Amino acid sequence: MKILKADYILTCNENFEIIEDGAICFDDKIIEIGKAKDIEAKYQNIDITTVGKNSVIMPGLINPHVHLEFSANRTSLRYGDFMPWLNSVIKNRDKLLQTNEHNYMENELEKIVKSGTTTLGEISSFGGDYEACIKTPIKVVYFNEVLGSRPDTVDMLFNDFKSRLDTSKNGHNKTFIPAISIHSAYSTHPILVKKVLDIARKENFLVSTHFMESQAERDWLDYGNGDFLEFFNAFSPDTKPLSSAKEYLELFYGTHTLFTHCTKASKDEIEKIKELGGFITHCPTSNRLLNSGRLGIENIDKSMLNLGTDGLSSNISLNLWDEMRGALMMHFLGNLDVLSKQLIKMSTINGANALGLNNGILKVDKDADIIAVNLPDILNSADELATQMILHTKKADKIYINGEQIV
Ligand SMILES: [Zn+2]
């Protein structure tokens, strides 16, 4: 059993409760949280670690949407609009995917854990990230992705997906959870979507999908025109959209799904996602770099929203603190401290709920996925804690996953 003591315990519970001069006692699960003096009196024969001046203990961060396979990208991809970016991904894909010889993914995972992220949702397109995700101490929900729109390739693509899914099922353990990803409505044939979602329902796999990320996607699914018309016609003439946005969403009944981006989703589509019991992953930096527009988070049920970085294919950092800083600047109309609290909840408890995990909150019987952070100076008041943490934090000073310290 371990006990940590800090100036502030940020629980990330419903009321965003902060315990000043608090302590937390844990094994692999959290045993007790409270005022340091009460915990010290109760557990007199156990060593207590003080985490230093201006210290904060909080749940480890949760990033539900990342593409580690693109970790080699720095300056190869074209930003500013979705279509030029997509074309640059296709052009540079083979080069970017040859990452193993340079350990790009392992290096990013090390940076991610040092930043204080203890859980990831990894979107795996090709399976090249499997070894790195199995080895990392970070909890990984591993979304095996399926993608492909040509009807004559459905069987081949399904078999390839199945074999990757089976491999990841063999790796299932306390820190590696297999799951399913469907790339998007415009890129994945509905027959393939149905076959894969049947498996998700039968075997209880989480699902992730990109949804309404660009104006091109909106124009294509609604009218069969826009930037995607030229893009698809280059592969085969007279291509039509595979389904409408509404038909696509209907396929997800009875699943537990994370819908990523949604910047171009209509009010009705957001309502439909809510009705499906779905979650929305917000990736503000990626949205800005691809000119996808701003997600109107103020109009969405807060409990549905979580925060992701997307991959280095559309970001410069997989550190969620950087993402929170970006989100704080992007959503500039609301109250600063209220938004900061929302962003920290999106990066902890909301991510845990979206990924169906028993962490993301400091509460008795939850997994002891805990980080400690030291602020550079004292605070005016605990009410500013969330804002000052987002402004000043780049890394965690102590990290525990299932109660085990990561060094
Ligand atoms: Zn993505």
Image (spheres, grey):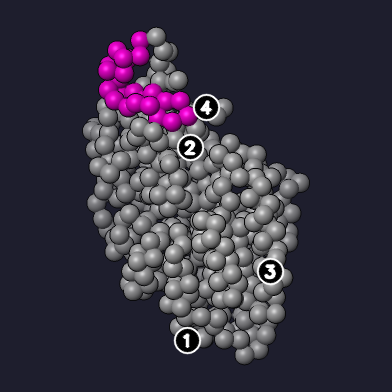
Q: Say few, some or many: other residues with alpha carbon within 10 Å of mark 3 (under 14 / 14 to 19 / 20 or more).
A: some
Disc 3 residue lies near ligand 1 with CB under 8 A: no
Q: Please, which residue is most extreme toward the top here?
A: 45
Mark 2 or mark 4, earlier in chain: 2
Report the Cα–Cα distance between label 2 and label 4: 12 Å
Q: Position of residue 202 (x, y in %)?
A: 53, 60
The stretch in magenta equals 21-44
Q: Nearer the viewer, mark 4 or mark 1?
A: 4
What kind of residue is marked 1? Tyr
Q: Residue at x 52, y 28 (%)?
A: 404
Q: Which residue is mark 2?
A: 116
Residue most extreme to the bottom: 238
Q: Disc number at residue 92? A: none
Label located before the other in sequence (4 or 1)? 1
Q: Which residue is mark 4?
A: 405
Q: Quadrant of residue 93?
A: bottom right
Residue at the spot of label 1? 223
Q: For marks 3 and 2, give the CA distance.
A: 36 Å
| Distance (Cα) linking label 3 and label 4 | 41 Å
Q: Which structural element holds mark 1? A: helix
- Viewer-side label of 2, 4: 4
SS label for mark 3: helix
Q: Identify residue type, mark 4.
A: Gln
User: Residue at 56% of width from left, 47% of height from top?
Assistant: 177
Question: How far apart are the alpha carbons under marks 1 and 2?
Answer: 44 Å
Mark 3 highlights which residue?
157
